[in-house]
Image (tube, helix red, strand yellow):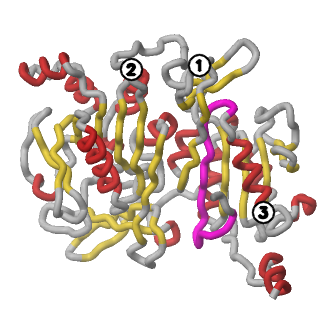
Amino acid sequence: MLSFRGSRHGELITITGPNLSGKTTEIERLLNSAHGIIWDPAKGESSNIVVAKHPRDDISNPGKIAGYPALETDDPDLIAKQVTKDTEAVVISGINFFEDPKIVDLLHALVLSNRKVYVAGHNLDWEGKPFNFMPQIMSISNNFILKDAPCMVQGCRLGATRSQKLSSSGERRCLIHHSFRGRPDVHIDRLGGLELFVGNMYASKTTAWYEKMKELDAKGIRYVVFKWSNDKRFSERGKEYRVFDKGVIGMNNHKASIPAILVRDMADVIRYIRGETGIDGLDSMNRKSPVGHIFIDEGQFIEGIYAGVRDMIYQGYRFYVTGLMRTFKIEPFGEMADLLTIADNISVMYAYCEACGQKATESQRLIVRNGQKSPAPYLDKDIAIGSKEADEDVTEVYEARCMDCMEIPGKPKGDYSFKPYVPLSNSRFALKVSKGN
């Protein structure tokens, strides 16, 4: 259930989906639940919840989200000016229409200042491509509400995850009925899709991913597992491999491992699936009986993964991908941001902060020198394979951290900075409860 309260830290929740999928309804429910209890929209600019919308969002209802008044603007600065020390939450509808990159920094600054932020908008445009800054916004989100509803093509009951442009309007469509110039042809007679398992380091993403494999095993469904050939941890350190060799994916508890095919990039994945590896027996089997379910570990390392997955889900393939949404700099990692926009299911997992014990959303990189750990500087490279403990081969280690405990020396300041929101013990809600007693 959506709520403006309940978390110690700031959060960004993104509500997204195709045309007519109920995104505005989710915002309306959220505002309904707060109205008259912790929020009074009649206070206008002095309200503790800032409500805004882009002018292109729901143009038939100007200046409002459902029945509630909203600041209508395409300027992030105007939204920032509404934020006071008493602002505990911000709601923005039509987030996909913002064309100023400062909108991303605004959202991040609000979260850093311990505020709850809800945004709603289309993740994809008419051709199924990421809409404006939605990849960056989704990559810094803490959770997602992916809205869908039945495809609007008569007789189709499949879930709609795309928006189809019509002559004067738009409607929601499933992958099979979503048409546009250059659409890939169907290869496998089934509905394709993408499931993502994301979170920070040590959040048990691989464990949840592995459960999906066991589900397919129980049904007798064939699948294939891939991992990046340069990701050598646990027992694979120091070993040399060739593309399409068999490696293993280790689990954090070191008690289990998952066999996987080693690839350098998405082009290798496609060659394997299409039977173009040059390995005779393997190629003939894959051409005769194509594998429709594809697991990819640590998707942030796989170059070309977004374009490859996007085309292949239209062709009927189903992908299951683990990965980090953000680097240790709290910035989009590889192509994961774009993958988030085309996923039909996103499982977000968290660990516990190793500094304070609260819920951790980030991955802190630490450099080990002479047995001493120090936070990696902002200008350090994005990719450095590490683990929890250092040894003669590992000089970078990682810890799960909450936003408050993250340390990134040299990180540039953003366009916005807000004083942290501190909940008041004498809030209207607290007073109301005390009177009721």
The secondary element bearing badge 3 is classed as helix
Q: Is residue 295 left or right of residue 109?
A: left
The secondary element bearing badge 1 is classed as loop
Q: Provide the residue designation for mark 1.
A: 155
Residue furthest right as drawn: 42
- The span picked out in magenta is 4-20
Residue at horizontal 87 percent and vertical 37 percent from the top: 62
Q: Provide the residue designation for mark 2.
A: 315
Residue 435 position by quadrant: bottom right
Q: In this view, does 109 lie above or below 185?
A: below
Q: In this view, does 250 lie to the left or right of 185?
A: left
Give yes or no for contact between labels 3 and 2 (Cβ–Cβ under 8 Å): no
What is the spatial separation of the Cα atoms under label 1 and label 3, in whole angstroms? 39 Å
Residue at horizontal 76 percent and vertical 35 percent from the top: 57
Q: Earlier in the sequence, mark 1 or mark 3?
A: 3
Q: Earlier in the sequence, mark 3 or mark 2?
A: 3
Asked if the stretch drawn in magenta spans residue 9, the answer is: yes
Quadrant for the C terminus in the image: bottom right
Q: Is residue 353 visible?
A: yes
User: Tag 1: residue type?
Assistant: Gly
User: Tag 3: residue type?
Assistant: Ala
Q: Is residue 95 visible?
A: no
Residue at horizontal 54 percent and vertical 45 percent from the top: 138
Q: Provide the residue designation for mark 3.
A: 34
Give the number of the disc on residue 361. Answer: none
How packed is label 2: few (under 14 Cα within 10 Å), some, or many (20 or more)?
many
